[in-house]
Amino acid sequence: MKKTKPELPNPRPCLECHETRPIAARGLCERCRSRARRENLKPFTPASAVSQGKAARNFAQLISILEDCKVSSKSVTVILREFLPYSGQPQVVIEAYTRAIREREEANKLEEQ
């Protein structure tokens, strides 16, 4: 016996696109619901395809290079702030580094005064 796909409810206007279509969930048609779901997904970055172990090694190598080149702390802050979202690190790690960068910037401002 072949399984049949359950029928969607009667067509009604979608809350998003206002077209009369079968409503899938929360007042949205399937097209708008899928669009909203895709928008909520983590955006793909090349680093998101990298394992966390490799991402950690890459990040450690970047830190090592910055130290070897004797880059100023302001430049390190700028570089890390731009690199972190693409590093492939878990969101918790990115937030911790961002917090540390912000605290370092505030400490530098206090020292300059």
Image: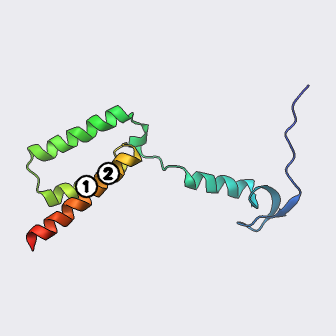
Circles 1 and 2: CB atoms closer than 8 Å: yes
In this view, the residue farthest toward the bottom is 113
Judge left or right: residue 83 versus residue 51.
left
Left-right relation of 68 to 61: left
Residue 99 point in image, percent of width and height: 30, 57
Q: Nearer the viewer, residue 3 or 25?
A: 25
| Residue shown at 18% from the left, 54% from the top | 76
Give the image quarter of residue 62.
top left
What residue type is disc 2 on? Answer: Ala
Q: Quadrant of the N terminus?
A: top right
Please, what is the three-letter code of the amino acid marked with disc 1? Ala
The picture places residue 12, in percent across and down from the top left corner, at 84, 63
Name the colouring of the figure. Answer: rainbow
Q: Which mark is residue 113?
A: none
Query: Residue 59's quadrant in the figure?
Result: top left
Real-space Cα separation, disc 1 to disc 2, in angstroms: 6 Å
Report helix, strand or loop for mark 2.
helix
**Location of residue 89 in the rendering, given as x and y in whole percent from the top left corner:** 36, 43
Q: Nearest the camera: 63 or 106? A: 106
Task: Name the residue at 30% across, 37% down.
Answer: 56
Quarter of the image that includes the C terminus = bottom left
Residue 76 vertical position relative to residue 90 in the rendered view, above or below = below
**Of helix, strand and loop, which one carries label 1?**
helix
Q: Which residue is mark 2?
A: 96
Residue under label 1:
100
Q: In which quadrant of the rendered view does residue 26 lie?
A: bottom right
Judge the density around disc 2: few (<14), some (14-19), many (≥20) Cα neighbours within 10 Å.
few
Instruction: Using the image, determine if residue 111 lies above or below residue 6.
Output: below
- Mark 1: give few (<14), some (14-19) or many (20+) Cα within 10 Å: few
